[in-house]
């Protein structure tokens, strides 16, 4: 730790001491001391919501990130603790009723399953349409939607250090095995990558791959230094650990080993990028969070930041501007602002696209060019990543200007197209083409792709 001494004041050093990883879920919600200050009613609401939506928080978040004097408005609290309005009033009442009557556990579980089905657990045909094959066999735990980039879901990374209340992969955290996408097989990943010379990027995702022990991560990543994976230039790791458990990079038993692995990959000529999920500048406010960034950057890995725009957490241009400024200062590159997806607790978090663009633009105007590397607001929808470029008027018609940042067909990328302005719309499927046209330019081709995928499934 001696090099660290130069960077931090004495009291901050104390905050860099290791702490045990202590986690709370819906089963021991009652044992979180900080919740004692909340009303009985609020705690009951939490219990009700967390029997439908996944809940997991750890002591670092509770003690160092959440400002309990600002609860319930505190953004870090909203990011991790269940709130009543995350369920529809009807769904909430039905579940609350079971709890009030102290119904048997199976009955609660049965209703929970039913209510989850109403929350669009499979947005954008996540699984079936993007699963690649090798020798005619479907490969579980892999997704290949965009030509250059393969997503890999390691089975040891199927959870997170805490859960975001707005998570779009929430179904895999509620114990429903059907909804899980995972792979244990490093050799299958390698066989697939070796067969795909056009793939330049491997993206490890989950859950959070940083939940994995370094020895498991090694099995997946070390072989990529072999010459046959020369084409896999970029290794990205999607993670929320820089917020939820920065100790992973600082004080965990295998933190040093992890950093050495990343450094070896960089030395072997790979671009290593942590795709860090951030929602608020406050997440970078602790000495531990900053030390994690500093240590990661010392390996030669890049950190890029991405995250959704969310009501109750960050629907304010000032919050985004400060977040991007803080990131630039710490050496983190702003990458994407996402639109909250049409699943799970979206009713609570969604922001109209028109407002999302105003917030994006408002934040952009307040930062220097170094912060303007963030693209968005972007919807990861079935056909691709669609960015709202702006709102304008063409021949008297108010329109959204849109473009694909990524497309299921790469040829769709970067072509401007137009939708009728709609102040309320929150997702691509609510938009209609402008100028009286019947369909967006990509729709027929996309429908044909869907039909093909359904026929082979
Ligand atoms: C966002 C995304 C990627 C990566 O896209 P980039 O624009 O290269 O960051 C890859 N696959 C899927 C399915 C994605 O949603």
Image (tube, rainbow, N blue to C red):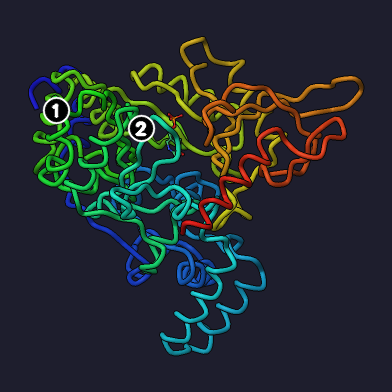
Q: Earlier in the sequence, mark 2 or mark 1?
A: 1
Ligand 1 resides in the quarter of the picture at: top left
Q: The residue tagged with tag 1: helix, strand or loop?
A: helix
Residue 67: image x %, image y %?
Answer: 43, 45
Q: Is residue 276 left or right of residue 101?
A: left
Instruction: Tell me: residue 267, above or below residue 208.
Output: above
Specify whether tag 2 is near ligand 1 (CB below 8 Å).
yes
Question: Dot 1, crowdedness within 10 Å: few (<14), some or many (≥20)?
Answer: some
Residue 244, image quadrant? top left
Residue annotated with mark 2? 275
Q: Is residue 320 left or right of residue 65?
A: right
Residue 436, image quadrant? top right
Residue annotated with mark 1? 225
Instruction: Tell me: residue 313, above or below residue 369.
Output: below
Quadrant into which the N terminus falls:
top left
Q: Is residue 374 left or right of residue 421?
A: left
Q: The residue tagged with tag 2: helix, strand or loop?
A: strand
Q: Nearer the viewer, residue 16 or 136?
A: 136
Q: Nearer the viewer, residue 193 or 287?
A: 193
Residue 318: image x %, image y %?
Answer: 58, 26
User: Which dot, 2 or 1, sits closer to the camera?
Assistant: 1
| Residue at the spot 66% in from the left edge and 73% down from the top edge | 90
Specify whether tag 1 is near ligand 1 (CB below 8 Å).
no
What numbered label is drawn on residue 447? none
Whether residue 220 is visible to the viewer of this picture, yes or no, is yes
Whether residue 340 is visible to the viewer of this picture, yes or no, is no
| Residue at the spot 56% in from the left edge and 55% down from the top edge | 343
Residue 389: image x %, image y %?
Answer: 66, 24
């Amino acid at each position: 730790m001696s090099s660290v001494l130069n960077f931090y004041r004495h009291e901050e050093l104390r905050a860099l001491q290791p702490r045990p990883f202590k986690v709370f879920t819906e089963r021991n919600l009652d044992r979180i001391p900080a919740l004692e200050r909340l009303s009985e009613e609020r705690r009951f609401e939490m219990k009700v919501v967390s029997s439908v939506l996944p809940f997991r928080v750890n002591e670092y978040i509770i003690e160092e990130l959440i400002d309990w004097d600002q609860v319930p408005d505190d953004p870090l609290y909203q990011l991790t603790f269940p709130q009543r309005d995350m369920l529809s009033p009807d769904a909430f009442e039905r579940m609350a009723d079971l709890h009030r009557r102290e119904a048997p556990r199976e009955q609660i579980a049965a209703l929970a399953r039913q209510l989850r089905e109403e929350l669009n657990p499979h947005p954008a045909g996540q699984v079936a349409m993007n699963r690649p094959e090798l020798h005619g066999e479907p490969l579980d735990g892999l997704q290949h939607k965009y030509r250059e980039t393969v997503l890999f879901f390691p089975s040891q990374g199927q959870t997170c250090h805490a859960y975001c209340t707005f998570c779009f992969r929430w179904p895999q955290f509620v114990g429903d095995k059907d909804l899980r996408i995972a792979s244990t097989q490093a050799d299958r990943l390698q066989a697939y990558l070796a067969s795909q010379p056009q793939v330049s990027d491997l993206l490890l995702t989950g859950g959070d791959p940083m939940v994995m022990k370094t020895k498991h991560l090694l099995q997946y990543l070390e072989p990529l230094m072999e010459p046959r994976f020369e084409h896999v230039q970029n290794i990205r790791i999607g993670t929320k650990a820089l917020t939820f458990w920065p100790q992973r990079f600082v004080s965990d038993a295998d933190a040093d080993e992890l950093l050495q692995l990343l450094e070896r990959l960089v030395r072997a000529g790979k671009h290593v990028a942590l795709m860090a999920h951030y929602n608020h500048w406050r997440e970078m406010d602790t000495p531990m969070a900053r030390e994690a960034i500093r240590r990661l950057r010392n390996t030669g890995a890049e950190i890029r930041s991405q995250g959704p725009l969310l009501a109750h957490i960050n629907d304010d241009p000032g919050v985004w501007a400060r977040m991007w400024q803080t990131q630039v200062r710490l050496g983190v590159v702003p990458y994407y602002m996402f639109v909250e997806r049409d699943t799970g607790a979206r009713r609570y978090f969604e922001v109209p696209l028109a407002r999302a663009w105003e917030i994006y633009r408002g934040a952009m105007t307040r930062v220097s060019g170094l912060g303007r590397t963030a693209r968005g607001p972007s919807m990861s929808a079935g056909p691709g990543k669609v960015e709202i470029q702006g709102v304008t008027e063409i021949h008297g018609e108010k329109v959204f200007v849109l473009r694909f940042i990524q497309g299921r067909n790469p040829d769709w990328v970067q072509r401007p197209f137009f939708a009728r302005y709609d102040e309320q719309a929150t997702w691509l499927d609510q938009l209609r083409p402008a100028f009286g046209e019947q369909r967006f330019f990509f729709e027929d081709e996309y429908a044909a792709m869907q039909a093909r995928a359904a026929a082979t499934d």
